[in-house]
Every structure is written in C-alpha cells, then in structure tokens.
Image (cartoon, rainbow, N blue to C red):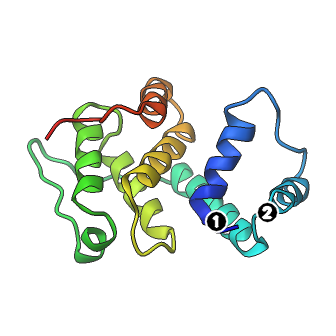
Amino acid sequence: MNENVVDILIYLYENYMDDDQPPPDDQHALRNDLAEVGFSQNEIDKAFFWLDELAKQISHPPTPVRQANATRIFTAEESNRLDADARGLLMFLEQNEIINAAGRELVIERALALESAYIDVDDLKWIVLLVLMNQPGQESAFVRMEDLVYNEAPLYLH
C-alpha cells in the first residue's frame, strides 16, 4: 500500500472522528487497527507524532502580531512545498474567516511537518480540517471547512 501520513490522518478522521464508531480504547489497539488495514508501522508512528505535535501547538499557541492590511510573505521552503494554489487556498480561507492568522500559521507549520516534498491542495484541505477540529471555539469554521473538503466544486474562482 502506497500510503503517507495524510492518508492515515484521513482514515482516522473518516473512520473514527466523523463516524458513530468510537476509536479503540487505547492507542495500542488503534495502532493495531491501522496496521491491519495495511498502513506501515513507520507511517503510523509518524501520524501519531504529527497529531501529538498538533495537540502541543494548540495547547501553547504563539501569539502572532497582525496589523491591518498585512500581507503574509512565504519563505522559499514554504513556496516550494506549498504551490500557488495551496497558498491561494490559505488566503481564501483567511479572507472568508474560516481560519485566522494564528490558524494559518499552525496549518503552514503542520503542512511543513509532513515529510512530503510537495503538499497539494487536497492534502492541505485535510490539514486545515484537522487543525480546526482540534481548536476549541472553531466549530462553525470546522463545519464550513468540512463542507469544502467534501464538496467537489472549486473553492474559488481565479
């Protein structure tokens, strides 16, 4: 099976977080379930580490300074790994108040934490969804983002 961390995160979301079926009682059982469906232990470890780091970041968020009409400039690494469409998606989500500046920074950090050389728009949508799901008080934004993840229509017009 050619999987990556995002595939595992999507699997966890669709099978345990967005369903009536609760996850197994302990992490060991959940890891076994993931291995049984074909994910490698190495990728499972990376996915759990990614989720642990997300939890840490949310519990101790940085306080970005944002001035009115400020523009986010992406570093060379961010631009290489998040193409213009992905950066445009982040701008769209922020302008439509689905994420705020702090959320955008967390999404970028979590995207870059993946070992993928390139993060496509579909993977970035899932990262945003998982970040919002783990942020208290973001239920409305989460519902809007979930609709965007499952909606086949384009998010925005060029």
User: At 23% from the left edge and 76% from the top edge, which residue is drawn?
Assistant: 76
* Left or right relative to 24: residue 3: left
User: Which comes before the other along the chain, label 1 or label 2?
Assistant: 1
Judge whether 5 appears above or below 59 on screen: below
Location of residue 34 by image quarter: bottom right
Q: Residues within 10 Å of mark 1 (few under 14, many from 20)?
A: few
Q: Nearer the viewer, residue 11 or 107?
A: 11
What amino acid type should be assigned to the residue bearing mark 1? Glu
Secondary-structure class at tag 1: loop
Is there any visible trace of residue 62 in the rendered image?
Answer: no
Is there any visible trace of residue 44 in the rendered image?
Answer: yes
Judge whether 109 appears above or below 88 on screen: below
Tell me how far mark 1 sits from mark 2, CA to CA.
9 Å
What amino acid type should be assigned to the residue bearing mark 2? Gly
Question: Which quadrant, please, contains the C terminus?
Answer: top left
Question: Which quadrant, please, contains the N terminus?
Answer: bottom right
User: At 37% from the left edge and 52% from the top edge, which residue is drawn?
Assistant: 121
Judge whether 97 appears above or below 68 on screen: above
User: At 42% from the left edge and 52% from the top edge, which residue is drawn?
Assistant: 124
Residue 23: x %, y % from top left: 82, 41
Q: Which mark is residue 120?
A: none
Q: Residues within 10 Å of mark 2 (few under 14, many from 20)?
A: few
* Left or right relative to 104: residue 122: right
Give the residue at mark 2: 38
Q: Nearer the viewer, residue 155 or 130?
A: 155
* Disc 1 and disc 2 in contact, CB within 8 angstroms: yes
Q: Which mark is residue 3?
A: 1
Location of residue 94 by image quarter: top left
User: At 40% from the left edge and 63% from the top edge, which residue is drawn?
Assistant: 119
Q: Nearer the viewer, residue 140 or 58?
A: 140
Residue 15: x %, y % from top left: 73, 40
